[in-house]
Image: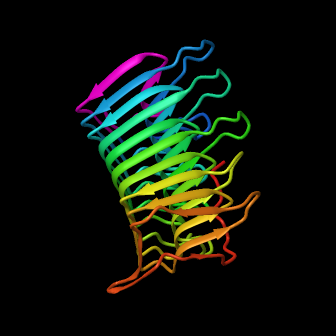
C-alpha cells in the first residue's frame, strides 16, 4: 500500500489484524496538510468504542507525521519495522515512529505489547507513550532524528503522564537496545518505568542548542517518575548516564560506562532519590569506580506537548 493520503490504514473502533503488509509513502491530506500516517487506530468518533490492533511482520516505511498511532484501545506490534517517518511537509514538525496514548475525552485506556521490532530513523521520537500501559521486549530504537522544524527532541523513547487527567502510565522494557538517538535515550516523565537487560548507548545532544544528551532522564510530571533499572548497560552517552530531576531511581546489577556523569540528581518540584541495590559498576574502559551521584545543575529535557 503506497502513495495514499491521510492514512495508509485507518481503524475506527474495530478489531483489525494486519500481517505481511507494507505501508509506504503516505502523505498529508490536501485540505490542511495534516496526517499522512502509516497506520492509525483510534476510538470511533461519537461512540466509546475502542479499537483493537494487531500488526505483525510488516513494514511501515517513510510515511508522514506518524508511522503507527494508537489512540485508545489495545495493540500488539510484533516483528514490525517502522522507519524513516517524515515530518509534516506543511511545517516540518512531528515524524514519530510509534505513538501510543490514552483517549482522555472518552476515558478509554490504551495498552500496547511491542516485540521483536525495529524502530529506526524516525523524527522527533521513536516511541511516544502518553499515560498508556506498554510492555516491550526484543526491540531496537535507534538513530532517531531531531524535529526538522526546530532541531528539538530526536529521542528514542518519550514516556509521559497526562497531568490534565491524573493518568500516569506504566512501561516495562526488556532485552531492548536504545542507540544513537538525540537529546535523551529514554525520557520518563511522571511514569512508572522498569528496565531489564536493556542497553542505552551513544545519546547525542539536542541539535537545536547542543545541550543534554542523557541516556535516561527521569523527571517529575504530575508526580515523580519511578524508575527501576536491572541488569542493564548505559554507556557512552554525551551527558549523564542516568539523570533524576525530582524523581526516584533504583539501580541493580547495572554497568554505567564512559558517560560524562554516571549519575546526576537534582530537586525539581520535589526531591530526587537514587537507590543503589548492589552489583553496579561505573567508570570508563578498564578503570572502574563506585557509582557516585553528582548534583551538578543540569538543564532538564522537556516533555512533548
Front-most of residues 104 and 206: 104
Residue beneath the point at 52% across and 29% down: 110
Position of residue 150 relative to residue 30, above or below, is below
Can residue 52 be seen in the rendering of this structure?
yes
Query: Residue 283 sits in which quadrant?
Result: bottom left
Query: Is 288 left, or right, of 300 in this rendering?
Result: left
Front-most of residues 216 and 206: 216
Q: How is the image coloured?
A: rainbow
Give coordinates of residue 66: x percent, y percent.
48, 43
Residue beneath the point at 38% across and 43% down: 136
Q: Is residue 178 magenta?
A: no
Position of residue 109 relative to residue 265, above or below, is above
Front-most of residues 156 and 84: 156
Give coordinates of residue 119: x percent, y percent.
36, 50
Position of residue 68 relative to residue 292, above or below, is above
Give coordinates of residue 70: x percent, y percent.
49, 32
Query: Is 170 left, or right, of 85 in this rendering?
Result: right
Query: Is 91 left, or right, of 127 in this rendering?
Result: right
Q: Is residue 3 magenta?
A: yes
Position of residue 60 relative to residue 290, above or below, is above
For the N terminus, which image quadrant? top left
Region of the chain picked out in magenta, as a range: 1-23
Give coordinates of residue 133: x percent, y percent.
50, 35
Can residue 93 be seen in the rendering of this structure?
no
Residue beneath the point at 63% across and 69% down: 265
Residue beneath the point at 62% across and 37% down: 32
Task: Determine the residue located farthest toward the front in the rendered image.
Answer: 278
Amino acid at each position: 500500500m503506497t502513495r495514499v493520503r491521510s492514512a495508509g490504514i485507518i481503524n475506527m473502533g474495530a478489531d483489525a489484524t494486519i500481517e505481511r503488509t507494507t505501508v509506504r509513502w503516505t502523505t498529508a491530506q490536501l485540505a490542511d496538510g495534516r496526517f499522512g500516517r502509516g497506520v492509525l487506530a483510534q476510538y470511533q468518533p461519537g461512540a466509546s468504542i475502542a479499537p483493537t490492533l494487531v500488526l505483525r511482520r510488516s513494514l511501515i516505511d517513510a510515511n508522514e507525521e506518524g508511522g503507527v498511532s494508537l489512540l485508545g484501545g489495545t495493540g500488539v506490534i510484533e516483528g514490525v519495522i517502522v522507519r524513516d517517518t517524515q515530518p509534516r511537509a506543511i511545517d516540518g514538525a512531528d515524524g514519530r515512529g510509534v505513538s501510543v496514548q490514552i483517549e482522555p475525552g472518552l476515558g478509554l485506556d490504551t495498552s500496547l505489547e511491542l516485540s521483536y521490532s525495529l524502530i529506526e530513523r524516525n523524527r522527533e521520537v521513536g516511541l511516544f507513550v502518553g499515560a498508556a500501559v506498554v510492555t516491550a521486549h526484543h526491540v531496537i530504537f535507534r538513530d532517531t532524528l531531531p524535529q526538522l522544524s526546530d532541531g528539538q527532541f530526536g529521542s528514542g523513547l518519550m514516556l509521559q503522564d497526562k497531568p490534565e487527567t491524573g493518568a500516569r502510565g506504566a512501561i516495562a522494557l526488556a532485552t531492548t537496545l536504545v542507540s544513537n538517538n538525540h537529546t535523551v535515550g529514554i525520557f520518563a516523565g511522571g511514569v512508572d518505568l522498569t528496565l531489564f537487560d536493556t542497553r542505552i548507548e551513544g545519546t547525542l545532544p539536542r541539535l537545536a542548542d547542543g545541550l543534554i544528551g542523557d541516556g535516561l532522564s527521569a523527571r517529575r510530571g504530575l508526580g515523580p517518575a519511578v524508575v527501576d533499572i536491572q541488569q542493564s548497560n548505559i554507556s557512552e552517552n554525551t551527558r549523564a548516564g542516568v539523570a533524576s530531576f525530582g524523581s526516584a531511581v533504583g539501580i541493580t546489577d547495572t554497568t554505567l560506562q564512559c558517560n560524562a556523569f554516571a549519575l546526576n540528581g537534582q530537586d525539581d518540584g520535589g526531591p530526587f532519590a537514587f537507590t543503589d541495590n548492589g552489583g553496579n559498576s561505573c567508570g570508563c574502559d578498564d578503570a572502574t569506580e563506585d557509582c557516585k551521584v553528582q548534583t551538578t545543575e543540569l538543564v532538564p529535557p522537556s516533555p512533548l506537548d
